[in-house]
Amino acid sequence: MRMKAFLFAAGVAAALATAAAQPGALPAPGFHHLHLNSMNPETAAAWYAKAFPSTSKTTWGGMTALKSPNNVLVLFSKVDQPPATQPQTAFWHFGWHVTNERATMARLRADGVTLLPLYTGDPDRPTVNINSDTFPGTGGVLGLTRAQLDEAKKSNVKPAGGAGFAYIRGPDDALIEVQGDMPAERFNHVHMYHEEPFCAQLWYQKHLNVPVPQGRRGAAPAEARTEANCKVPRGADKTFPALDVDGMHRAPQIPLVFSDVSMGGYTRQSDASLVSTRGHLADHVGLSVADLDAWIAKLRSEGVKFLGAGPDLNPVRVGDTRAIMVEGPSHEAIELVEIKP
């Protein structure tokens, strides 16, 4: 009996140890890189290094690269024709924090960089370059509906001025956000569109172990989302300012963060489904993991779609490390790169 009890206890301990080591307990990946297709990687990397002086040209895995101070990389692959920017994929744009928004925008304008207009919905001032030069959003939303704009004008609300967000056009027709005034200049985000934002958030939580977001202090608790209620209709009202003259849908939206890089996103803007990111300007994002084999086992057991992998899901060599590609919930390509601690 004692022997049986010992063996039972040992079996329980082994089962608990195995459960503790299951792939589901793996820490969330870090943000490693954004991978762009470019007709001239060297010229593109030089353009970014000049536009954002805290970055520097380098190489990684045999590819031309740009390095941000937060150790995020932008990688470039050479293509023979302009990379696609349409139809729309899950990657809307990417962006930088800057320390002085208005000084940065003035410098970029002087350097001949194209500054994109933000449409305000206000006939008295139809466009601005920085969102803070038009009516501010309310309730944590970055824009106002037409009804809210009318109310703001009646109430004599004034633009906040100062820092805000703005957009510029980069190499290969890239759409880039410039946001300030921040403590340091760095690569900050990849802003996404999602087929079903709340369902996408659940996918990232389940498969990539992204922490559940915490509500703002003092804010009412958000409705808990499950697979049963994650599909939420797109908000009826568009808001301003926006890159499109008739505004943009900003609801529903979700936060997602890997390391110090945001990958939050809005609902897709049209009725057309999003297409795969592969072969487009922003081809994929790269996330860093310490144990690639453990992640492959986890994702395979959960039925995640692997891209470009053989029947044995063998990783590919990238420079002196290994990587594997999976597809996210809105057809975004996500590369898991093994970076040993």
Image: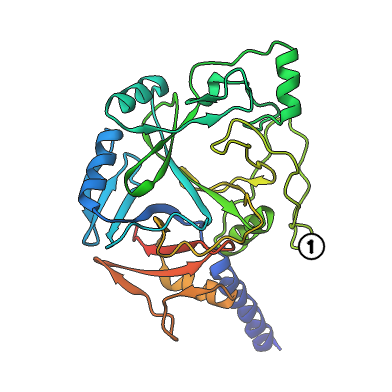
- Viewer-side residue, 261 vs 168: 168
Quadrant where the N terminus is found in the figure: bottom right
Left or right, 28 with respect to 280, comes to right
- State the residue at coordinates (29%, 34%): 51
Question: Could you say which quadrant of the image residue 75 lies in?
Answer: bottom left
From what the image shows, is residue 22 above or below residue 155?
below
- State the residue at coordinates (58%, 64%): 207
- State the residue at coordinates (47%, 63%): 333
**Image coordinates for residue 293, horizontal then vertical, percent:** 43, 73
- Viewer-side residue, 209 vs 184: 184
- State the residue at coordinates (57%, 54%): 210
* Circle 1: residue type: Ala
**Image coordinates for residue 248, horizontal then vertical, percent:** 63, 40
Quadrant where the C terminus is found in the figure: bottom left
* Residue, disc 1: 228
Left or right, 137 with respect to 41, comes to right
Answer few, some or many: residues within 10 Å of disc 1's Cα (few below 14, many 20 plus, some between 14 and 19): few
| Numbered disc 1: secondary structure | loop
